[in-house]
Image (cartoon, rainbow, N blue to C red):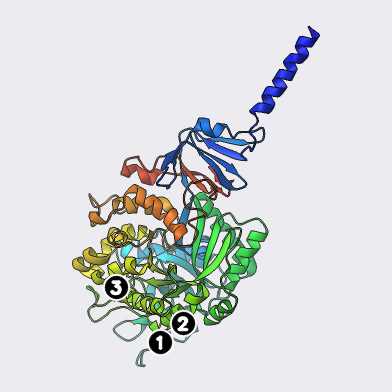
Amino acid sequence: MKHLFLLGILGVFLFSCSSQPDNPADSVFINGTIYTVDSRNPKVEAVAVKDGLIQAVGTSDEINAFVGNDTEVIDLAGKTMTPGLIESHAHLMGIGYNKLELDLMYVKTYDELVEKVAEAVAKSKPGDWIVGRGWHQDKWAKMPEKTVKGFQTNEELNKVSPDNPVYLSHASGHASFVNGKALELAGIANLKGERPIEVEGGEIIMDELGNPTGILSERASGLVARLIPNETPERAAEALTLALQELAEKGITSFHDAGSGQDVIDLVDQFKKDGKLTSRMYIMLTGRQPELLEEWYKKGPMIDQDHLLTVRSIKLNCDGALGNRGAWLLEDYSDRAGHRGHETLPMSVVTEVSEKALPLGFQVCSHAIGDRANQEVLDRYEAAFAKNPEIKDHRFRIEHAQHIDLEDIPRFGEMGVIAAMQAIHLSSDRPWAIDRLGEKRIVDGAYVWQKLMKSGAVVTNGTDAPVEPVDPIPSFYASVTRKTLAGTPEGGYEASQKMTREEALKSYTLDGAFAEFEEDFKGSIEVGKAADFTIYDQNIMEIPEEQILDTKVVRTVVGGKTVFSR
């Protein structure tokens, strides 16, 4: 009997050893609806992860074979998982600072804006700056009685803040609204009877008497912005912490930061060293600091072997936005005769930077919203490519590509220029953008995702946060419906340009990875790629479109590690 007992124990021991896989996974995700964005294997049930990479994909039974004694098993219980979402154009520190300052994104009237400023003044000392962002006059329920060139004036702002300078950035980031105290500090408070100050690439909006209204468009904002006290290192670290939390909560595993200086790069690098970086960062060097570019030309791109922090691109700001009529157009604005927007950067700079960057391995990413800006940038890219014909894989980008002349659309595909677009801008801007451009220009070349993709161009997706909330779900919704977030109009605006759900998901994953030269490492769920995943409480690929906006991210995974769980 004793021998039989020992044999039984030995049998259990041998069975347990044989059931332990040779190479157990660190974690497995089973029983899910998993969209891989891999055309050869588009949908699976389960994934195994080892050392931060995808070890295997397949059915739940197949992946259970990788479960060892120490393997973490995450039962998706039917939930939907996709590759980690990639935000292809937004402003990292802006997201964080937006949480530390006045958030005016949801203000619906001028009176509400003034009320928020009054509340901030009550909590401040005289002389302290009141800073905020997010207002957009075209999104208000109603405009105040007095307007100049389509904008409000600052009389009410002056009443509630006589002693505190106020600087409020437009949602687009291409204009500002300031009070009399701020204008006084900048030396432009009272220009009556004097010749208006000329601002290259910008405009000080004046009333009929020649006095500033408080609206500073494009580069004119710098007259006041440069007076705002510099941020402290502590406040910058707080802003970055808040931004990273927001990205994790919204399912974003990689982030393209659209123009920063060395201070942000150093801060992100320190977060990486401290193990606090919860999203992969692709930082574009700001073209507003020529000396910074010269330094990086000498040392070349920084391509991170850990795929956590890469610097290999340059951001140029070439025109304004439609909201403040700053986008650079080929013809006059439909709602402002004689005005075609602003060239906010000399095109000679685009030529110079493109020709310097290309042979050194830097990608150029140019902000261009208006059709004139897009055309001018394409012309300069084309000339740079012609001077360096041996370089085939440049992946130069146009950021926004919001309004393009019909004849220039095919050039994106022909030249291999990436259109880094934000579908959410269609939802937010299209109802009033037709006033700026008129129906023909809207139909021919505004938000033309399908026309660009059919040209052979890669189209990426994002939000331009903090211009819009960084949440990818509304942008995904806009991609497939071309409706406002209120669900209008029936059938969507210019419905022929809708993306399929598969195209929309790819624009937020594999295409985003391609736009940063990382498509072999991430962007799809394939063996050997990064274990970056976004998990949702609803199946965004199959639910009725009216339910998409109710979807929530329930888990975000970066390199196999959960950085957010609801």
Percent x, y for residue 177?
41, 73
Assess disc 3: are there few (<14), some (14-19) or many (≥20) residues with their C-alpha within 10 Å of its C-alpha. many
Counting residues from the start of the chain, the first of labels 3 and 2 encountered is 2
Tell me the amino acid under the disc marked 1: Asn
**Image coords of residue 228 (percent x, y):** 53, 76
User: Residue at left 23%, top 55%?
Assistant: 496
Question: Looking at the image, which residue sits at the far top?
Answer: 1
Q: Nearer the viewer, mark 1 or mark 3?
A: 3
At label 2, the amino acid type is Leu
Q: Mark 2 falls on what kind of element?
A: helix
Cα distance, mark 3 to mark 2?
28 Å
Q: Which residue occupies the extreme front position in the image?
A: 390
Q: Which residue is mark 3?
A: 371
Q: Against 268, is 388 above or below?
A: below
- Categorize mark 1 by other alpha carbons within 10 Å: few (<14), some (14-19), many (20+): few
Identify the secondary structure beneath mark 1.
loop
Question: Do labels 2 and 1 touch, CB within 8 Å?
Answer: no
Q: CA distance from mark 1 to mark 3?
A: 35 Å
In this view, the mark in front (2 or 1):
2
Residue 223: numbered disc: 2
| Mark 1 vs 3, N-terminal side | 1
Q: Which mark is residue 190?
A: 1
Query: Which residue sits at x=51%, y=68%?
Result: 121
| Snapshot quadrant of residue 114 | bottom left
